[in-house]
Image (cartoon, helix red, strand yellow):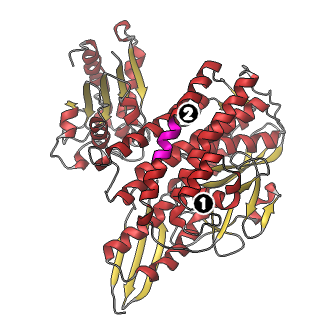
């Protein structure tokens, strides 16, 4: 099993960087049970992510996702939510090209990992800023705990 | 002709950065036709001032997520020129491998993901998955993956290299890794040739348009110049004064663009794969020459839409060249060399390389402590903006009889053929605060 934990986002665009912030938080925890997990800063994703996906059997993507929720709240998506969704693209990942497109491409090429989970955090602001917004900062500890607990449950994602 | 027409392409897709196309025609007469660069300026040269010589490479790499290796190499050459550093033969070879890796990465991304959808009649690369062109997509993705692996091996990262440093490399690939890479390149060659076949079969989709212009790139008597060479123009020949590059690349500003434009002997010039092909095609490796024959492309080729085809030819050249470079490293045995020790001193240095989109210049002035006091970067896409504009002005009157959709698509295809890196190009702007 190859397990990838991938943070996505642009830390210069406010809450868009939450995926990277949470990835860094997880890495500092260094739990022994996670020693075989590969933690990867996927930057702003894009088509190179197709190659990263092909390396794993299980993948957890941490990203800012606008699912019209309260800022700082999270929702756990599966690849299916992105592949077959009826939501307009703008309500999905905040990056270009969209995560949905990358997952679709990987799916059609049969290189999608067996298990794909997307830990989406609702952003409040995507403006040019190296800091997260106040409502998202307030949730960082809680989001880290949720993610940590999710990683502990592996492979029951 | 009584045609009225309005084409406004806001933020053209499948290019890097933000550019608009505006065309207004009234009663068959063109009222306005502009290639507008609307990306926000990025002030990189200002960021370099006051920074230590060892940081310049790391900062300028971030100008571009596609040609970060090229920016790193131009930066290192400028820094080493200013400090009077001579690099080893092994470093020269590894840097040539790095530039090949980036050319391959960038070209296959443009050919496969950005330009091919136009030729195959789809909106993006995504619909190719599961379509009758699925097999083509798999080849594109495989070649892109190999290019990423190669960048990673030589430079330590797929993007924004970390092993390239002033005076050498911080880590050198092992003999075994180089042997594996060579084998992968050998396996990639047939896939690349298959793509040549696909592109050739689509060549009838390329607009029949010719506009002769000036072509500028590096040239060398030794090789098809990418890493090193003499700045050369098809109009005026070689230009040996590297430090006086600004008399070759005359930059100027226009109201419709946040990026500078450039000209030399005429109103505009072209840089990039097509310019290099026009200057140096006789030095391409044999299988790249075969691809050129297959496309029936001969220098001078004056159809800018064929820049994408010149990129495909270069992709094959880069594979062949990389195999030869790996052989050179293997025959010497890769050595764990330490980078050259640096003694800071005052000076000015200019670094010039060919990156995927054309000739790139970095120019630094350092003080006695090795801190940067002045910087200038000339980006390939800047040098192409004026040529894009003049191509449009020559092209539009010949296609006005077509439908608005066809005109729009043809103009989009023209800009995409240049593979512009708009974010890179919007780096200038001196602000006078009052």
Residue under mark 2: which chain is it in?
B
Q: Point out which mark residue B186 bears.
A: 2
Give the image location of residue A55, x and y in percent.
Answer: 38, 25
Q: Which mark is residue A92?
A: none
Up-down: is B386 above or below B245?
Answer: below
> Considering the image in quadrants, where does the N terminus of chain B appear?
bottom left
* Image location (x, y in percent) of residue B185: 55, 34
Horizontal placement of B46 versus A51: left or right?
right
Element carrying mark 2: helix
Alpha carbon distance from label 1 to label 2? 25 Å
- The quarter of the image holding the C terminus of chain B is bottom right
On the image, the x and y values in percent for residue A123 come to 28, 39
Q: Is residue B141 magenta?
A: no
Q: Which quadrant would residue B369 be assigned to in this image? A: top right
Front-lying residue, A98 or B1: B1
Point out the tag, 1 or 2, that comes first from the N-terminus: 2
Please provide percent x and percent y for residue B408.
Answer: 37, 71
Tell me what residue is drawn at x 60 percent, y 31 percent.
Answer: B155
Q: Which residue is mark 1?
A: B274
Position of residue B384 relative to residue A81, above or below, is: below
Image side of residue B11 versus residue B89, left or right: left
Q: Nearer the viewer, residue B428 or B164?
A: B164
Q: Chain of mark 1?
A: B
Within 10 Å of disc 2 (Cα), the crowding (few <14, some 14-19, many 20+) is some
Magenta residues span B188-194
Which residue lies at the image location 65% right of the left edge and 40% below the top edge?
B321
Residue nearest the observer in this picture, B164 or B376? B164
């Amino acid at each position: 099993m190859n397990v990838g934990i991938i943070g996505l986002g642009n830390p210069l665009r406010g809450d868009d960087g939450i995926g990277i912030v949470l990835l860094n938080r997880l890495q500092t925890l260094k739990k022994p049970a996670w020693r075989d997990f590969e933690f990867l800063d996927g930057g702003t994703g894009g088509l190179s992510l197709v190659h990263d996906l092909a390396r794993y059997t299980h993948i957890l993507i941490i990203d800012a996702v606008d699912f019209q929720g309260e800022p700082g709240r999270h929702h756990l998506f599966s690849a299916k939510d992105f592949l077959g969704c009826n939501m307009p693209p703008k309500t999905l990942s905040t990056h270009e090209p969209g995560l949905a497109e990358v997952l679709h491409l990987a799916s059609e090429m049969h290189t999608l990992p067996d298990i794909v989970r997307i830990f989406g955090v609702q952003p409040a602001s995507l403006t040019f800023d190296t800091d997260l917004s106040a409502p998202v900062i307030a949730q960082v500890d809680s989001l880290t705990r949720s993610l940590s607990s999710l990683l502990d449950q592996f492979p029951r994602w | 002709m009584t045609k009225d027409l309005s084409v406004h392409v806001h933020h053209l897709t499948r290019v890097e950065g933000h550019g608009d196309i505006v065309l207004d025609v009234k009663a068959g007469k063109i009222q306005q036709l502009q290639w507008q660069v609307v990306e926000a300026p990025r002030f990189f040269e200002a960021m370099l001032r006051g920074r230590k010589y060892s940081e310049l490479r790391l900062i300028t790499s971030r100008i571009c997520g596609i040609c970060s290796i090229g920016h790193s190499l131009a930066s290192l050459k400028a820094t080493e020129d200013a400090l009077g550093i001579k690099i080893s033969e092994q470093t020269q070879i590894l840097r040539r491998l790095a530039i090949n890796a980036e050319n391959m990465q960038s070209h296959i991304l443009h050919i496969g993901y950005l330009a091919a959808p136009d030729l195959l009649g789809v909106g993006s690369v995504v619909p190719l998955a599961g379509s009758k062109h699925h097999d083509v997509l798999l080849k594109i993705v495989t070649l892109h993956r190999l290019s990423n692996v190669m960048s990673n091996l030589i430079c330590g990262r797929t993007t924004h290299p970390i092993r390239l440093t002033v005076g050498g490399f911080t880590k050198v690939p092992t003999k075994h890794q180089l042997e594996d890479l060579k084998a992968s390149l050998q396996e990639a060659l047939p896939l690349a040739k298959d793509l040549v076949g696909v592109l050739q079969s689509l060549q009838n989709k390329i607009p029949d348009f010719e506009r002769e212009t000036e072509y500028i790139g590096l040239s060398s008597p030794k090789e098809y110049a990418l890493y090193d060479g003499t700045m050369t123009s098809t109009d005026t020949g070689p230009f040996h004064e590297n430090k006086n590059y600004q008399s070759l690349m005359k930059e100027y500003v226009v109201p419709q663009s946040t990026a500078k434009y450039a000209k030399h002997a005429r109103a505009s010039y072209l840089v990039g794969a097509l310019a290099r092909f026009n200057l140096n095609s006789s030095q391409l490796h044999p299988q790249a020459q075969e691809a050129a024959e297959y496309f029936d492309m001969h220098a001078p080729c004056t159809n800018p839409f064929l820049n994408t085809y010149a990129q495909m030819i270069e992709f094959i050249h880069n594979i062949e060249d990389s195999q030869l470079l790996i052989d050179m490293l293997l025959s010497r045995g890769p050595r764990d060399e330490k980078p050259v020790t640096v003694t800071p001193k005052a000076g000015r240095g200019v670094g010039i390389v060919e990156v995927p989109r054309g000739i790139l210049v970095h120019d630094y002035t350092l003080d006695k402590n090795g801190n940067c006091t002045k910087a200038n970067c000339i980006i390939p896409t800047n040098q192409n903006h004026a040529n894009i504009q003049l191509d449009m002005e020559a092209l539009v009157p010949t296609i006005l009889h077509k439908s608005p959709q066809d005109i729009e698509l043809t103009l989009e295809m023209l800009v995409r053929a240049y593979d512009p890196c708009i974010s890179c190009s919007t780096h200038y702007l001196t602000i006078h605060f009052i």
